[in-house]
Image (cartoon, rainbow, N blue to C red):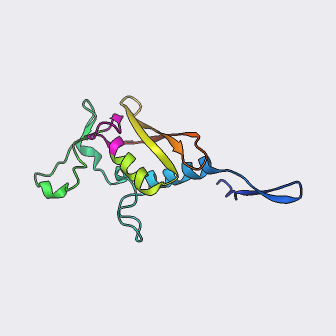
Amino acid sequence: MSNLSIPLRIEKGRLARIDNSKKAIDSALSLLMSTPCGDSAADPVYGFIFNNLRFEIFNENEGVVYNSSADESDDPEGIYSKKLSGSSSNLNTFAARLREKIENYEKRLSDVKVSMTYARQERKIYVVVKGKIISTGKAYQYSTVINVWK
């Protein structure tokens, strides 16, 4: 288990603020992506969809998750039939869905771009989030891997 760090340190006998913006944003994005939608009682739409998907309806060759139900009301937001690989500039990808979530919940970032790559042999999804930290103007990048279908 890692330690929780606070944004303060003692410098020349006085308290000084440490800029841990990147670390804090990394933690917030990790929490957002690992929380299943509907898991937060305070905000039922908080979280990301991967924990809720039924991956038995995944087409590995095309990198698409299909809705196995004939009833369209089971997928009102059009979550199914989205591609895993791609970027947030293509609206038919999970990357676009994640970018929307980040823009809604991580207000410390601007110019958010997300890309996802499905590595079929490894059965992993590589996620890269890029943007700009508003308070510092610095470029931001976060990378993670989602293991699926073990």
- Point 28% across, 34% down: residue: 63
- Point 42% across, 71% down: residue: 42
Residue 28 position within the rendered picture, expressed as x and y whole percent measured from the top left: 52, 54
Residue 83 position within the rendered picture, expressed as x and y whole percent measured from the top left: 28, 38
Quadrant the N terminus occupies: bottom right
Q: Is residue 117 left or right of residue 140?
A: left
Q: Nearer the viewer, residue 18 or 126?
A: 18
Q: Is residue 93 magenta?
A: yes
Vertical comparison of 54 with 84: above or below: below
Q: Nearer the viewer, residue 146 or 22?
A: 22
Q: Is residue 108 left or right of residue 85?
A: right
Q: Is residue 47 left or right of residue 27?
A: left
Q: Is residue 38 magenta?
A: no
Magenta region, main secondary structure: loop
Residue 29 position within the rendered picture, expressed as x and y whole percent measured from the top left: 49, 50
Quadrant the C terminus occupies: top left
Range of magenta residues: 84-96
Locate residue 123: give its quadrant.
Answer: top left
Q: Nearer the viewer, residue 1 or 108?
A: 108
- Point 34% across, 33% down: residue: 86
**Residue occupying the far left of the picture:** 70
- Point 36% across, 41% down: residue: 95
Locate residue 139: give its quadrant.
Answer: top right
